[in-house]
Amino acid sequence: MSKSALAGVVLAGAAAATLSMVASSLIARRPAPESDGPQEPSRCLTEADIQLSANPTQITLGQSSVVRWSVGLPSGCGGVRVRLDGDPVAATGTRAITPPRTAMHSLVVSHTRLGVQGETRRSVQIAVGYPPVVVIGPQTPNPVAVLVGALVNSTNEHQTVELCDVDLDMTGLAGIVIGSNRALIASPACARGPRSFGPRIFVTDRRGRRALFEIGGDNVRFSGFRLEGPTSGIAQGDIKEKGILIKPFPDTTPIRRVEVSNMEIFHWSGVGVQITDNNEAAERGRLFNTNEGAVHVFGNFFHHNRHGAGEGYGVAVTSGGYALIERNVFDENRHGIAGGSRTEDAKDYSGFTLRDNLILPGGGKHCSESWWGALTGWRAHCWQTHQIDMHGDENEWYSSSNWQCGRAGETMIIQRNTIFYTSGLAIKIRGNPMDKVVVDGNVFKHGSRGSAIAQNGGCGWGDNITTPIDVRPNNVFGVDPRTFLGSCDFFGDGQVDQFMATGVTWWAKSPVTQQWRYLNTMPERMPVLQLGRVDADAVCDVALRSPRSEIAPRAYSKSGTGPWRRVLLYEQ
């Protein structure tokens, strides 16, 4: 069936439901105290004339519909209660309703006879349509319902929801499924930036493992806001909440573009963003190492996503998924980036490209859930684990759940990252990859390769490593770029930012948010750089230091974000 035909069926079904009145059966609340058999329903309900209508039944967001109802009762019927959407109302009346999303509105009539309470209801649907761009601000009524309605119920081919200056409490909600051509973003003027934290979506409830948002469609964008989970400390046991799960719907069409960008994602004890594949319709699923940017996670700050022994990941790529993860900052996660080797049927293996990320010193704490740990206390059996991880698909004889050997994912490219974390390993690959692991041009604070990178092989005696990690000679060990920091205004508002050149990337830290933000991919470090305003705007530039005989620099990067360009003085 074509998309247009299917849409017609759905709309026709919705119209039929809208115009029909749905009557429920009488419901006995409790048995009569003086009768052994079933009681006859109250004639006050069976003979009542109950009418409910809405006009119009199809509106646009922000418009109102008038609901009318009347309840005609037989003679001698007292004590009958009438409720509209849970509110007590008179037997006859009207109400203007401005619904935030499509919903059924119900009139419930109840009566108690001989100790038995019964009820009957009528319902009518009011369908809500949405403009292509819905902006949710401080004055938006029922903002959470508007957000969910626009993303889930909208019939527009493309739907965008913009957030501006809002704190949205989505406690109690989970599994909000996002289809294709949807965007949940901050309005450009309100987005997360060097001087702004951005809008916030948060939850406070103890919840299961189901994600708050489940992205199943293609061409989806989440950007510019904070996503806060309910666990600020280190969780234990089965408390493993997820912020965003990316799991494509069953299909044979490769995913083209799913983006998670410029967000602050924190306090999710399971995982901030998890990327999986779906091979129900195609053996290799819809995500591949040949199209690394189909899922693109970039420019985010993942922090304080912690669990004592289970998960606690900033980003996890599992069940055959693949993602490009770049220009992010990670701090105080158990693992910054984690991988699950394969799908359950072992037909699709996971992988990732990690490029130009900044991994700060915090996090990595692991606490055993073993029986001896439970007897002696968690703190006695805690240690530091690693930050970049790919599990194997098998276990050694002494463990049934660590997945520390066998085949470990497919393709892992780890390139131009700066890793300050030294409390444990930086990288651990727990088996032999199906394709390869390449560690290329990274900067490690660890003093040596052996203290930074480790690999397991196949299970059994010996190392059994058949596909070793390809550690390129251009990796740098024993370097701490924080020793040489600069300062300048990189955002043109008069406030001074810290500047860090790691040897692979440049970063600026705002005095307002205290967060590092990616500027550029450049190998030059502070000893050969100078900061200042080279051109006419108010934003700081980064220039190459000039020879002592010259006053002005010969080349500079505009705002620290552009490529090297000649200073005009030398072009004349």
Image (cartoon, rainbow, N blue to C red):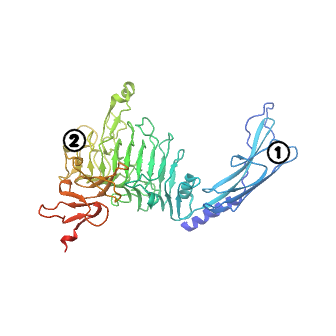
Count of marks placed on residues: 2
Percent x, y of residue 389 = 31, 45
Percent x, y of residue 419 = 27, 47
Left or right, 337 with reference to 173: left
Label 1 environment density (alpha carbons within 10 Å; few <14, some 14–19, many ≥20) = many
Which of the two residues, 97 or 559, is positioned nearer the viewer here?
A: 559
Asked if one can make out residue 411 in the rendered structure from this viewpoint, the answer is no
Q: Give the amino acid type for the residue marked by disc 2 in the picture.
A: Ser
Quarter of image, res 140? bottom right
Q: Is residue 177 above or below residue 132?
A: above
Query: Residue placed farthest to the bottom in the image?
Result: 572
Looking at the rendered image, the quarter that the C terminus falls into is: bottom left
Asked if one can make out residue 64 in the rendered structure from this viewpoint, the answer is yes
Which of the two residues, 545 or 112, is positioned nearer the viewer here?
A: 545
Labels 2 and 1: the sequence-earlier one: 1
Label 2 environment density (alpha carbons within 10 Å; few <14, some 14–19, many ≥20) = some
Numbered disc 2: secondary structure:
helix
Residue under label 2, please give it.
451
Quarter of image, res 95? bottom right
Looking at the rendered image, the quarter that the N terminus falls into is: bottom right
Left or right, 99 with reference to 482: right
Left or right, 313 with reference to 564: right
Query: Residue placed farthest to the right in the image?
Result: 75
Q: Is residue 415 above or below residue 1?
A: above
Residue visible at 24% across and 47% down in the picture: 482
Percent x, y of residue 100 = 60, 56
Q: Give the amino acid type for the residue marked by disc 1 in the picture.
A: Cys
Percent x, y of residue 311 = 39, 41
Numbered disc 1: secondary structure:
helix
**Label placed on residue 44:** 1
**Label placed on residue 415:** none
Residue visible at 52% across and 51% down in the picture: 176
